Amino acid sequence: MTRHFFTVRRSLCAVALVLASCGRGNREPRPSAIPALPPRPDTTARQPAISDSARRAAARADSQAVAKPRADSLARDTVLARKAAPPTPAGAGGRPKQERRCQLNFPNTPDTRVYIVQDPATKRNNTFVGGGVVAKCGGQDITLYADSAELYDTIKLYYLFGNVHYREPRVNIDADKVTYFLSDERILAEQNVRATMPSGSTMTGPQAEYLRAVAPIRQIARLNAIQRPTFTLIQKDSTGKQLDPAKLLADRVSVIDDTVYYAGGNVDITRPDMHATSDSAYMNETRQYGRLLKRPQIEGRGVKQERQFILRGKAIDLFSNNRLLERVLSVDSAQAVSGDLDLRSDSIDLRIADNKLSRAQSWGPTGARAVSPDQTITADSLDVLMPNQKVREVHAINRAFAETVPDSTKLKSKEKDWLRGDTIVAKFDTALTADTSSKPRIRELLATGDASSFYQIPSNKGVTAPPNLNYVRGRVITVSFEKQEVQSVVVQEQAAGILLEVDTDSTGTKKPKTTPKPLTRPGSSPIRRPDR
């Protein structure tokens, strides 16, 4: 079967050359609706010529039946869509109810040209249309526009070419080429594809597939895009105010009913408050929930890109409220990094307020580890309070251990001060860190439950002199700091300890005193118990 193809840019003479001889001036009379055309038993027979006055009269008659559209195909969307059948009634939430199979009618335009070939075996028509195509689904608010089309009734397959526009309440699709598979209600758009959904979100890319919600084929509409499409997601707060849009890029994306997104292959999500990457992603706009899988990473962004944080793990869950990120949960080999804190654990739960990290909790079989510029704290679980993304308190629970780097301007030592206990609470002085680039200063360490500590005290003989050593243990130990230097160590209940002061012999060799200086417990006599 010979296939003929017409486009709007081809001249009337070129169309006639396909049908017959252009020099003889034979032309087809233009019908107003394709289904109304009678089948032609002999498609090669030449038709009698029609005078110019007859053609003009036919054009006037068609213009009375169908409103004259504007010249450009985009304008036809607004003119002819109003002439279509009444829209499908809306269901719950304002969305259209499930639709029926599409039975296409072709009102077309006054400039449309048609050529029909009948299949001898099936007696069905194959139709070739040029000069502008308008097609409507009978009884449904669905309209297609194109410059030309090929319609194969035998296999229920329609090709539309040039400035193709598909319009329905669930989605609008624009492309250079569209293939409509009527048997399974599937629309394949190719080349310069742009889709607009009811929420206002858009997709651009080289290819997209739209699956209509038609019983019994499928219950929910789906849009599949491949070859790395770009989605611009429109978001609104609870008052209806439109927020800055989010961007979604991936090798392939599936959208279900304009609310659920599945993305796979080099996923990249950009929002005003974060930037996320992963191998695959799931997002539910209604629940304001998302999940990233396989090498995910979240980069939180504060005001003017200040005080950023980064979260990694094997799986990351995102929870938003009023379209603002408020919680991020990372599981399996999780790591959270901010300007003041490097937190590692099996699971990390971050809470966010005003686009800034406000709290971090970590736990898991391998324990948790928090590293700040001068502190390292490990325990079975950690709870870090950091309002405005400035570390204020760190709670280490069960088998807690804290290390502190001594102030190098006060003493020289390769050893670190440390504190251990069942629970440790570290408090930082955030009042002195108004500058976002400054480090938090430790103010107090409190250890409870079988606690012990080791601290180095600067010698009164200078910075280069070996420091004095202080080791204590007890039920509760409180270590106070001032300007990153230990000021006092208070032991409560079951107190015991030892203080070593370094001395210098007559040869100038430095050595610790042989008799340790005992420590005292508040309200008691000196304690001379040796270290356990």
Image (cartoon, rainbow, N blue to C red):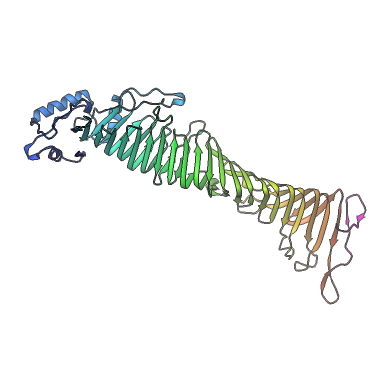
Left or right of residue 257: residue 334: right
State whether residue 146 is above or below residue 444. Answer: above
Q: Is residue 244 visible?
A: no
Q: Given the current orientation, which residue lies at the most extreme left position?
A: 24
Considering every residue shown, the one lying at the far right of the view is 525
> Where is residue 381 drawn, in percent x and y?
69, 46
In x, y percent, where is residue 486?
77, 56
**Range of residues picked out in magenta:** 513-532
Q: Nearer the viewer, residue 46 or 325?
A: 46
| Quadrant of the image containing the C terminus | bottom right
Location of residue 247 (image quadrant): top left
Placement of 322 over or under 369, stated as above or below: above
Position of residue 335 in the picture relative to residue 460 (left or right): left
Most extreme residue toward the bottom, as rendered?
A: 507
Mainly helix, strand or loop, the magenta region?
loop
Residue drawn where x is 25% and y is 34% of the image: 152
Residue 141, percent across and down? 34, 26
Left/right of residue 531 with respect to residue 299 in the rendered view? right
| Above or below: residue 30 compared with residue 205 | above
- Residue 122: x and y in percent read 23, 30
Q: Nearer the viewer, residue 196 or 334?
A: 334
Residue, x 53% and y 41% (percent of image)?
Answer: 291
Camera-side residue: 153 or 314?
153
Please name the residue shown 75% across and 68% down the image: 464
Q: Is residue 22 visible?
A: yes
Question: Does residue 304 appear left or right of residue 222 in this picture?
Answer: right
